[in-house]
Image (cartoon, helix red, strand yellow):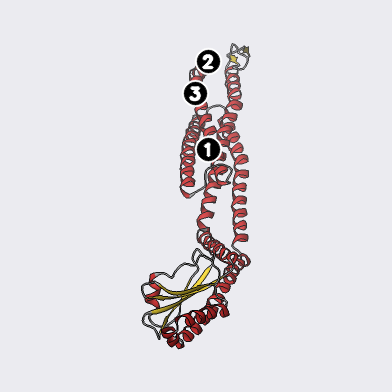
């Protein structure tokens, strides 16, 4: 009997079909777990930093799982197409159920991916809008202007002190004690933190430090070479809160005047923070497109895995729905041909019904 032959064939392929479906289900679960972990990493919900390498590795794994799941679904689609070509009972219904289930699953996933990409783009627009850029640039400009103002004041003091010390060359030669008093008065009147007279090798000839607790660094060696031209050379604060300047004394033999001015340490710290923030902002702005592409790929991967999972579930649902209908149709065909002893096995209860 045709029906009995089909039932025997179905029984023989039942074990292989169950194993195949379980394998597909396992792949689907692993893919969903992988996508969930990737999303958690991307949102910063784990101890793993979402670096470029981590994202690339995660997307490679997700892509491989999606490819395997797509291969499993392709096999199911091939079986369904072959069944329809052979004119198997309920093959058209099987196709419609799978297609309907896939569309119902695909539309929300695609809409969510598009919505997520648009939301990310709008969110980045708020970060990179003109007002935000102006705030960052203005903060850096204000901090730099404050530092430059101190540098200009120090430059003026440095030129004036150099001229006064050059004119006091005779006092230096014949009245060293009086020169030291004169030098200390110059430092005190101009309100600078400290001043030094150094030789070309950086050795201290005389110095005045108004704050004995201040840690005043000496100028770098290359600053002496730069100051040989006679122009004042300003020295950035670096890691300290002191801005310095050095200038060659023309009336002395290879002597240099080195003066420093203290600035508010909070301003120096704010300047460093502003420079760091501006640099990071520029890096973020330059890598904005890459971030958008990375997030879009992640969202696309999530949508793809969810879609393929939904299609696989749809195949399982359609198989369970169409299989009894196909058996009943085949049994009805046998009855129409005069075979009144047709039996239909019901797998769920294990009973045998007779039509």
Q: Residues within 10 Å of mark 1 (few under 14, many from 20)?
A: some
Q: Tell me the quarter of the image containing the C terminus.
A: top right
Q: Is 123 drawn above or below residue 15 in the view shown?
A: below
* Of the image marks 1 and 3, the number of the one nearer the N terminus: 3
- Pick the residue in front: 340 or 170: 170
* Discs 2/3, front: 3
Q: Residues within 10 Å of mark 2 (few under 14, many from 20)?
A: some
Q: Quadrant of residue 197?
A: bottom left
* Discs 1/2, front: 1
Q: Quadrant of residue 273?
A: bottom right
Q: Quadrant of residue 262?
A: bottom right
Number of the label disc, if any, that sits on residue 288? none
> Residue at position x 57%, y 29% from top?
316
* Count of numbered circles on the image: 3
Q: Label 1: state its secondary structure.
A: helix
* Discs 1/3, front: 1
**Residue 260 in sight from this viewpoint:** no
The residue that label 1 is drawn on is 34
Label 2 to label 3: alpha-carbon separation: 23 Å
Q: Position of residue 341 (x, y in %)?
A: 59, 11
> Residue at position x 51%, y 80% from top?
181
Q: Is 309 drawn above or below residue 353 in the view shown?
A: below
- Pick the residue in front: 336 or 154: 154
Q: Label 3: state its secondary structure.
A: helix
Number of the label disc, if any, that sits on residue 19? 3
* Of the image marks 1 and 2, the number of the one nearer the N terminus: 2
The residue that label 2 is drawn on is 4
């Amino acid at each position: 009997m045709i029906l009995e032959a089909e039932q025997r064939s179905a029984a023989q392929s039942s074990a292989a079909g169950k194993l195949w479906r379980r394998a597909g289900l396992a792949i689907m679960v692993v893919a969903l777990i992988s996508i969930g972990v990737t999303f958690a990493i991307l949102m910063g919900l784990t101890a793993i930093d979402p670096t470029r390498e981590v994202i690339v590795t995660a997307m490679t794994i997700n892509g491989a799982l999606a490819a395997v799941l797509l291969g499993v679904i392709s096999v199911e689609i091939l079986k369904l197409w072959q069944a329809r070509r052979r004119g198997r009972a309920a093959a058209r219904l099987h196709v419609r159920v799978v297609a309907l289930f896939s569309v119902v699953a695909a539309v929300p996933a695609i809409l969510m991916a598009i919505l997520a990409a648009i939301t990310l783009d709008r969110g980045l627009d708020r970060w990179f809008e003109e007002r935000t850029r102006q705030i960052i640039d203005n903060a850096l400009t204000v901090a730099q202007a404050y530092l430059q103002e101190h540098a200009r004041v120090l430059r003026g003091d440095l030129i004036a002190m150099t001229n006064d010390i050059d004119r006091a060359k005779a006092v230096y030669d014949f009245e060293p004690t009086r020169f030291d008093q004169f030098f200390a008065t110059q430092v005190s009147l101009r309100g600078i933190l400290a001043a030094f007279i150094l030789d070309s090798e950086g050795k201290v000839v005389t110095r005045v430090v108004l704050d004995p607790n201040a840690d005043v660094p000496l100028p770098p060696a290359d600053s002496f070479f730069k100051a040989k031209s006679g122009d004042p050379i300003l020295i950035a604060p670096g890691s300290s809160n002191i801005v310095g300047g050095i200038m060659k004394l023309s009336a002395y033999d290879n002597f240099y005047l080195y003066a420093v001015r203290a600035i508010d340490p909070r301003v120096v710290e704010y300047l460093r923070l502003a420079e760091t923030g501006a640099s990071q902002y520029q890096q973020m702005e330059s890598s904005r497109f890459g971030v958008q592409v990375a997030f879009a790929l992640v969202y696309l991967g999530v949508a793809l895995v969810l879609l393929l999972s939904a299609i696989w579930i749809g195949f399982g649902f359609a198989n369970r729905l169409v299989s009894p209908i196909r058996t009943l149709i085949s049994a009805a065909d046998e009855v129409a041909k005069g075979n009144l002893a047709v039996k239909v096995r019901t797998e769920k209860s294990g009973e045998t019904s007779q039509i």
